[in-house]
Image: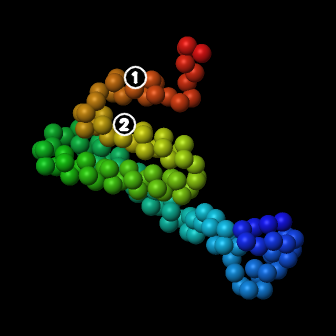
Amino acid sequence: MRIGDIEGTSQEITDLFQNEGLDIGKYLKATPSITNKKYHNIGLILAITGFLIINICVWTNDVSETIEKISIVVLLALICLITILIHQRYDKIIISGLTALFAVVIMSVCLDFITPKEALNKIDKENPFKKNSSE
């Protein structure tokens, strides 16, 4: 068995790391697990809640151009945070990408960049899971 520069049986490699007090995960540069899932979940819930509240406020109220610009920056920061937290949680690029895509679509609809009908058509057209009729 060979791991990186180390070769030997699995027991020899395990003994080497245990005797030297090393963590094999750090040596292999494995993705670290979430150390405190409670705080991670609380952060994710707060970020999603903030994202939804800002979108609802901007969509339902007539806000000035300055407030709209500030909300765009805050919403984009929240989209990044939510995407990072989702990626840490599931470690899947497709889930992270779809999260970011849907968040941007929701933000675009709430800021009147596109209409809900255009958003649904765009999502339906770019759906990676939908089979093309030409196939």
Look at the image and tell me in which quarter the C terminus lies.
top right
Residues packed near mark 1 inside 10 Å, few (<14), some (14 to 19) or many (20 plus): few
Q: Is residue 48 above or below residue 120?
A: below
In percent of width and height, residue 35 lies at 58, 69
Instruction: Give whichever of 21, 38 is nearer the camera.
Output: 21
The residue drawn where x is 15% and y is 39% is 62
* Disc 1 secondary structure class: helix
Q: Is residue 18 above or below residue 56?
A: below
Residues packed near mark 2 inside 10 Å, few (<14), some (14 to 19) or many (20 plus): many
Furthest residue in direction bottom, as rendered:
20
User: Can residue 133 be spotted in the picture?
Assistant: yes
In percent of width and height, residue 79 lies at 38, 50
Q: Quadrant of residue 27?
A: bottom right
* Disc 2 secondary structure class: helix
Q: Amino acid at mark 1?
A: Asn
Q: Badge 2 is on which residue?
A: 105
Q: On the rendered structure, is 96 left or right of 9? A: left
Instruction: Give whichever of 84, 117 is nearer the camera.
Output: 84
The residue drawn where x is 26% and y is 52% is 73
In percent of width and height, residue 121 lies at 40, 23
Q: Looking at the image, tell me whether mark 2 or mark 1 is earlier in sequence order.
A: 2
Q: Amino acid at mark 2?
A: Val
Look at the image and tell me in which quarter the N terminus lies.
bottom right
Give the CA distance from mark 2 to mark 1.
Answer: 11 Å
How many labels were placed on the picture? 2
Q: Badge 1 is on which residue?
A: 121
In percent of width and height, residue 18 lies at 77, 82
The residue drawn where x is 39% and y is 26% is 122
The residue drawn where x is 44% and y is 61% is 43
User: Can residue 45 be spotted in the picture?
Assistant: no
Q: Which mark is residue 25?
A: none
